[in-house]
Image: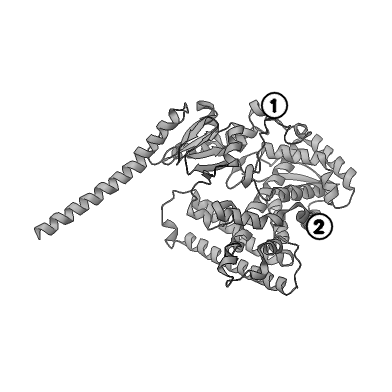
Amino acid sequence: MEDYVVVLCSVSLLLLLCGGGKAFYSIWWKPKMLERRLKQQGIRGTPYTPLIGDMKEFVRQIKEAWSKPMSLNHQIVSRVDPFTLNTVQRYGKISMCWVGTTPRLIIMDTEIVKEVLSNKLGHFHKPPLNPQILILTKGLSTLQGEKWVKHRRIINPAFHLEKLKGMIPVFAVSCSKMIEQWKENPFLQGRCEIDIWPELQKLTADVISRAAFGSTYAEGRKVFELQRELLTLTVEAMQTLYIPGFRFIPTKKNQRRKKLHNEITSMLRNIVQNKINAMRAGESSVDDLLGLLLQSNGQTDLSENASSTRSNEMMTIEDVIEECKMFYLAGQETTSSLLTWTMIVLAMHPDWQEKAREEVLRVCGEKEPNFEAIGRLKIVNMILNEVLRLYPPAIASYQHAYKETKVGDIVVPAGVDLNLPTLLIHHDPELWGDDAVEFKPERFSEGVSKASKDQQQAFFPFGWGPRICIGQSMAMIEAKVALAMILQQFSFELSPSYTHAPYTLTILQPQHGAQVILHQL
């Protein structure tokens, strides 16, 4: 019995030592080792605080910045991303901070940014995702490696410019519907106040529903309404301390998230399967994103019983469902953000609003814009690019070094995160000149490549390299159609009730809404 007790104590002590050793390595030894390697290269940054890193200070600065509005100008960086700005100002444009136990490199050198995003060696991927995000979608933007390559290859044809050209009438239908609702406002009588943020969210949700699901867009729209609720609950969960396994505890909100996820997946499964059956029977045209995706995927073989060889070359039904979720998350939110900030900025700069309207009326008259007309809207294109520069929907891109690699003169050890701060790069006077925080669309008059100072190509609103946003052309075409149709019917100014308070949750958005006064023309 005594021998048994001795063995038990010895094993317990060994396990305790092993656990303590692993904890010591993860919490102290590895972070300090990575910190030392970065410091040896002259990279400075915030001191390491075990376990929590800079989270406490990050939250404090964000709360302070978001607690009050700002002046009516475009110097938004200090309000939207104060922690990154303060770190760069204190330690340099290549500096270091901490996300828990992981060091994060902030890189504002545009050549290194492009090198990282080009990822020629394949050593950089997205940072490990919080499992709470994956309940929203496991689509293209969350994938890595061969699976990402396969999905990108299959999805690409659906976003080809010729295919998008045929969707312009679909965009116009949704815009016409919104404009008619605005005109029917009983308070209009020549002018009325509207919060355009929720209005433009509804517009882009309707657009992506019609574009993705064609004749079944009403069913798709219902899915997206549920997904919006799921997004809200997910963002809320991510703003609290992540505790592994907590999402499985049957709290009221966890149960609601699970129910929404199951309902969304079930509805999309029915839509996808019905589309497959209709296409096989020749009863459905291939003119929406889902149809194009299934066609590119080889829809006649898309079934649960597809051969293993063929299945390796195509997406499963589950994959298609996840990509349908991604259509909404990537397409709807990005375009609504761009359109909202464009209308706010044009309300702040009525001279450019009038220039854009004159161009639209000269090119389109009173007709809905078509593909040819959109290509001739040079001023509108310049305005949208300048808004994307000042108010990019995604304020940063994040990568993780899974293998040690060299970018520029920096050796990035495996295990280090990278923050490529799009917003800070877009507002950098060294790249854009002393007028970097001013709204000057003319800087894009000769195209994107010549817009920044010394032609450094410092414009990354949709990313860069092989993982550049697949829907960027669709977002720009949709924004041009919507903006042109609004300018044909209304002039607009900021309401006295508007509070300039840009902030970011999943995307850059107005914290207190976007109230404008519409004047019907």
The structure residue drawn at horizontal position 36% and vertical position 43%, both measured from the top left corner, is 26
Q: Residue 173 appears at what percent x and percent y?
A: 79, 58
The structure residue drawn at horizontal position 67% and vertical position 46%, both measured from the top left corner, is 337
Sequence-first tag of 2 and 1: 2
* Residue 169: numbered disc: 2
Which residue is situated farthest in the top direction here?
434
Q: CA distance from mark 2 to mark 1?
A: 40 Å
Q: Amino acid at mark 1?
A: Asp
| Secondary structure type for disc 1 | helix
The answer to whether residue 146 is above or below residue 451 is below
Q: Amino acid at mark 2?
A: Pro
Is residue 374 something that shows in the picture? yes
Of the pair 4 and 296, the residue shown nearer to us: 296
* Residue 13: numbered disc: none
Which residue is situated farthest in the front direction here?
309
Of the pair 466 and 198, the residue shown nearer to us: 466
Horizontal side, residue 120 vs residue 42: left or right:
right
Residue beneath disc 1:
454
Q: Quadrant of residue 23?
A: top left
The answer to whether residue 109 is above or below residue 10 is above
Horizontal side, residue 95 vs residue 169: left or right:
left
Q: Quadrant of the N terminus?
A: bottom left
| Secondary structure type for disc 2 | helix
The structure residue drawn at horizontal position 66% and vertical position 28%, both measured from the top left corner, is 431
Which is in the foreground here, disc 2 or disc 1?
1
Horizontal side, residue 117 vs residue 432: left or right:
left
